[in-house]
Image (cartoon, rainbow, N blue to C red):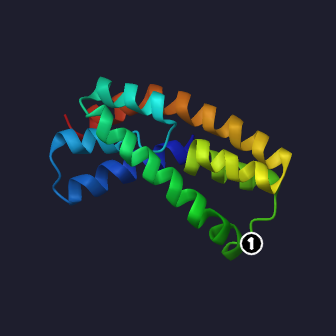
Amino acid sequence: MTGSVVAVLSSALLAKWLRLDSGLIHSLIPRSITTPIAMNVSATIGGIPAVTAVFVIMTGLLGVIMGPSIVKMLRIDGEIARGTLFGTGAHGTGTSKAFELSSLTGTISSISMVLAALFTLAVAPILSKLIFP
């Protein structure tokens, strides 16, 4: 849950700080969940689903590219922690990478991805209205 809240808030606040228009801001908010659900959340909160899909794919690719380095740099040894990192941060592509590490890491990543998507589906509209009334 913390990862989802941080992803939503950091995306929204960074976009606001960059003075992006509201359509782009609302398109960025659900970028850290799997593409079909992110597009649905984006449409619900006033974003542009096609733009959201691009941000989701970019987030997943960056997570797969940077994830292993982050795991090494922060010395994350636990399979549960690595799975949570990849599933929450890089969703489907991260889960694929997690399965390369081990079946337990991949399974935890899958569970994290689904839970993050469900939590963001429920919380993104609320946070969006609180940040951008």
In which quadrant of the rendered image does the N terminus lie?
A: top right
Q: Secondary structure at mark 1?
A: loop
Amino acid beneath label 1: Arg
Residue beneath disc 1: 75
Horizontal and vertical percent position of residue 25: 25, 44
Query: What residue sits 78% from the left and 39% below the top?
Result: 107
Horizontal and vertical percent position of residue 11: 36, 51
Horizontal and vertical percent position of residue 80: 78, 50
Q: Residue furthest right?
A: 103
Q: In the rendered picture of this protein, how many numbered marks are placed on residues?
A: 1
Give the quadrant of residue 42: top left
Q: Is disc 1 surrounded by few (<14), some (14 to 19) or many (20+) residues within 10 Å?
A: few
Query: What residue sits 17% from the left and 41% below the top?
Result: 22
In which quadrant of the rendered image does the C terminus lie?
A: top left
Give the quadrant of residue 78: bottom right
The foreground one among 33 and 100 is: 100
Q: Is residue 16 left or right of residue 1?
A: left
Give the quadrant of residue 118: top right
Query: What residue sits 65% from the left and 53% below the top?
Result: 85
The foreground one among 22 and 13 is: 22
Q: Residue furthest bottom?
A: 73
Q: Is residue 35 left or right of residue 17?
A: right
Q: Is residue 67 left or right of residue 104?
A: left
Query: What residue sits 58% from the left and 43% below the top?
Result: 91
